Amino acid sequence: MSEWTPQSWREKPALQQPDWPDPEGLSMTLKTLSSLPPLVFAGEARDLQTALAEVAGGNAFLLQAGDCAESFDSMGADDIREKLRVILQMAVVLTYAGGVPTVKVGRIAGQFAKPRSSDIETQGDVALPSFRGHIVNDIGFDAESRLARHERLLDAYNRSASTLNLLRAFTKGGFADLNRVHAWTQEFVADSPAGRKYAELADGIDAALSFMRACGLDTKDDARLHEVDFYTSHEALLLAYEEALTRKDSLTGDWYDCSAHMVWIGERTRQVDGAHIEFFRGIKNPVGCKIGPTATGEDVVALCETLNPERIPGRLTLITRMGAGRVSEALPPLLQAVSEAGHPVVWVCDPMHGNTFISNGGRKTRHLEDVITEIDGFFKAHRAAGTWPGGIHLELTGDEVTECLGGADEVGDGDLDYRYETMCDPRLNGRQSLELAFRVAELLAKRRNPQRL
């Protein structure tokens, strides 16, 4: 392959990039970004890759979850805390009930850009540039809102920095303490069937901690019980922004994209000869790539060869997004091709994007049962192939939204207008997320104990 630099992607076709109206201003903004401190550190990214290597080896499970598209308008401390709380609750369920360590990665502190199926959005007789996330423009349907503004890149950096600062405080400052596991139960989760199951699980954890103390083990000073490792990720869509935050590590001399610990490539931008793959092949972060139902085994092996030619465990995560009705047919050939090629990838299921449809009321939505059906098909395909179902990739929120159908609360078509607040795609709410975690934990427990099948 040709020599790589952080700028070499510019020689390739770059899809899904905004049409910036002020190139000179954009250049100045990118220069400013390149002079700012990194948002994350290379050592943290290496720690995540080590954890993902355990997932690739079948010894851990990845929970990657968070907002569809983060909003500049809802980034208060309460919003961040409640989103983190749901992810921590899910991780406890997967670890305790599923019997495997859970690697926790948020779609957070940088998930501001969204790919679009069309550059133009039309409403009635008016056609305007599509909304591409708050890092580019605004969601309001008027010419001023839809203008791409380079200043938003700096705003995204600053908001990511603030979010990361708060996440570090929460995860290392006592909020994630297992001795407080009952305190994680939000009111709107506590009065649901999943919430009651979680309370029972929390009782079990309390009992286990009490037993450890009775045996003379110190549960107060063991950091593993009071802190968690929590990593950030986002789709690295805007390559100029990612380039500006790419730094050479002083210890290894390698290049890292310091906008997040892990970044991924979307289904629309995974062309092997494209700009996104070119950028990703040179950074040393653990990276992901979304894979849809049209991908062939040859396509996926080519991605593996380009993104992880040295076959480093934990370096590459393949995130499949097939749809509940297609996963059983589309996934097995990919598992076989990658396995035969000898690539140690992390296989993750994104059960959200392939199960989106328009409700009777005109809202974009998903049904929880379709989401769970795809996860079940993902597990069955891996069991048949003898490979490890390494994780799930979800869009969720800590808010009590009504954006996805189903669940114990039986959110129906007529409920979607009650609290439909997403910037783009529908998200699971806290109750639905916890219900899903218990269902996945059952699948994990069965996978690790075949006699329970």
Image (cartoon, helix red, strand yellow):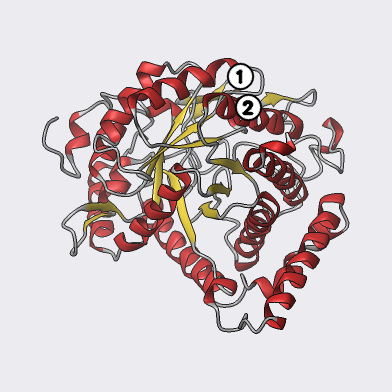
Is 256 on the left-hand or right-hand side of 449? Answer: left
As displayed, is residue 367 above or below residue 183?
above
- Number of numbered labels in the structure image: 2
Dot 1 amino acid type: Ser
Residue 338 versus residue 396: which sits nearer the camera?
Answer: 338
As displayed, is residue 255 above or below residue 204?
above
Sequence order check: which comes first, mark 2 or mark 1?
Answer: 1
Q: Nearer the viewer, mark 2 or mark 1?
A: 2
Circles 2 and 1 in contact, beta carbons < 8 Å:
yes
Is 353 on the left-hand or right-hand side of 89? Answer: left
As displayed, is residue 310 above or below residue 234?
above
Q: Residue at x 79, y 26 (%)?
A: 361
Name the residue that disc number 2 marks: 380
Name the residue that disc number 1 marks: 328
| Residue 275 visible (yes or no) | no
Q: Position of residue 269 (x, y in %)?
A: 38, 28
Dot 2 amino acid type: Lys
* Residue 91 picture quarter: bottom right
Secondary structure, mark 1, is: helix
